[in-house]
Image: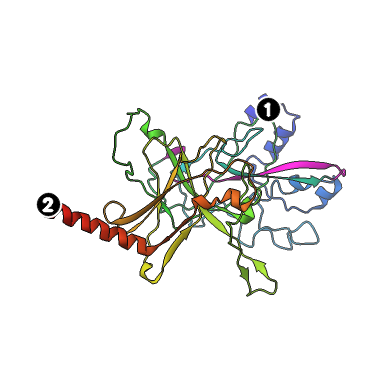
């Protein structure tokens, strides 16, 4: 209290708040006569709703004619309700820097959606929604003795280092998982290369992009590949189209002759199929990629080092701000091969081995 008095003074609002509620955890329902009398806006109505002190009052204790509790559980600051005072500080820390003029590629931003809304005074206001995809396996800091993600129980989020009040609105806050994993072993092709000192500067991220969240993505919007249509859910009363998404491999500072890959284990018996087909799209952070600068390869086999079939194509990048399906998904990037080709390649290899042994 002495510090608050010294900095803000006895008559300040900060001092009065600290005097009435030293812990700053008093609960207030989002409705109330006191809020109505001063026409409190919606942001300030929810400012203390997540506090714990007094959040489970009974109907008889309510100062209003309606219930004003947030929980039916007794008031407790034991968040996990294990009746134990946990003093362990062990966590992964991620920093997302917010600043004016953010765009795709800054602070884990994968997409930016722009729209306009009408404010209370009738004016139109342009706003932006940012989609962040933070890779959990690349923390900025590790605190305590935590080593893996087997016992994660909570997520804490806070804002620091702001010079003026801000308002952040969250549409969703989700943990996203997938069946594809990064391949962390060496994929360098045989050959001679110019030695480089910054071999560890290559970053690689595996994520996803879908038609509902990234249909207006910039600089290239996400569209369905040619010939692909969204499936319709016939089990509902209304014909609802299901979401459609694709795997994203994001690589930065890739060295000459080096590769990055994602893999997925499966028990699928490919002998029951005739062909394999895949659409591939390539784009750069800057619109300066040339045809053939990047290649895409696919491996099928029992492992990823010695026993597999491999098919590789040179990629044609999509120019920025392309919108049509044919431009975003060029036909030259399409992988459409028969499984019989792999069998013929194996037979040809075996014949060459026999020729070498016989000679």
Query: Compared with residue 202, is residue 180 higher up or lower down, i.e. above or below?
Result: below
Expressed as whole percent of the image width and height from the top left, the position of residue 238 reads 70, 72
Q: Whole-Å distance between the Cαs marked 1 and 2?
A: 95 Å
Expressed as whole percent of the image width and height from the top left, the position of residue 169 reads 68, 46
Decide if residue 233 is on the left or right side of residue 302. Answer: right
Q: Kindly tell me whether residue 188 is visible in this rendering.
A: yes
At 67% from the left and 25% from the top, the residue drawn is: 7
Q: Which residue is mark 2?
A: 359
Query: Compared with residue 22, is residue 326 higher up or lower down, i.e. above or below?
Result: below
Choose between 7 and 184: the one closer to the eye. 184
Do tag 1 and tag 2 residues touch (Cβ < 8 Å)?
no
- Highlighted magenta segment, given as a residue range: 120-143
At 55% from the left and 41% from the top, the residue drawn is: 108
Decide if residue 99 is on the left or right side of residue 146. Answer: right
Q: Which residue is mark 1?
A: 5
Give the secondary structure at mark 2. Answer: loop
Residue 132 shown in magenta? yes
């Amino acid at each position: 209290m002495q510090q608050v008095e010294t900095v803000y003074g006895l008559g300040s609002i900060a001092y009065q708040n600290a005097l009435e509620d030293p812990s700053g955890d008093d609960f207030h329902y989002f409705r109330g006569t006191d809020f109505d009398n001063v026409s409190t806006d919606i942001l300030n109505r929810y400012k203390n709703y997540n506090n714990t002190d007094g959040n489970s009052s009974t109907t008889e204790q309510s100062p209003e004619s309606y219930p004003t509790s947030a929980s039916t559980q007794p008031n407790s600051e034991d968040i996990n309700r294990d009746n134990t005072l946990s003093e362990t500080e062990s966590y992964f820390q991620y920093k997302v820097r917010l600043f004016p003029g953010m765009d795709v590629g800054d602070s884990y931003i994968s997409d930016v959606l722009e729209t306009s809304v009408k404010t209370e005074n009738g004016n139109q206001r342009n706003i932006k929604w940012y989609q962040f995809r933070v890779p959990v396996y690349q923390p900025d800091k590790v605190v305590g003795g935590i080593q893996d993600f087997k016992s994660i129980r909570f997520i804490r989020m806070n804002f620091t280092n702001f010079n003026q009040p801000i308002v952040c609105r969250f549409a969703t806050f989700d943990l996203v998982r997938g069946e594809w994993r990064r391949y962390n072993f060496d994929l360098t092709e045989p050959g001679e290369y110019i030695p480089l000192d910054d071999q560890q500067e290559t970053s690689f991220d595996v994520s996803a992009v879908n038609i509902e969240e990234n249909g207006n993505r910039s600089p290239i919007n996400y569209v369905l590949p040619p010939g692909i249509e969204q499936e319709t859910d016939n089990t509902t009363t209304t014909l609802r189209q299901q979401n459609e998404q694709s795997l994203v491999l994001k690589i930065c500072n890739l060295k000459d002759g080096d590769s990055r890959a994602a893999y997925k284990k499966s028990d699928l018996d490919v002998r029951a199929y005739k062909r394999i087909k895949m659409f591939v799209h390539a784009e750069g952070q800057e619109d300066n990629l040339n045809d053939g600068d990047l290649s895409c390869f696919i491996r099928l086999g029992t492992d990823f080092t010695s026993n597999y079939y491999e098919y590789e194509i040179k990629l044609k990048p999509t120019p920025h701000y392309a919108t049509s399906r044919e431009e975003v998904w060029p036909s030259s990037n399409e992988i459409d091969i028969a499984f019989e080709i792999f069998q013929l390649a194996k037979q040809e290899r075996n014949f060459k081995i026999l020729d070498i042994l016989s000679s």
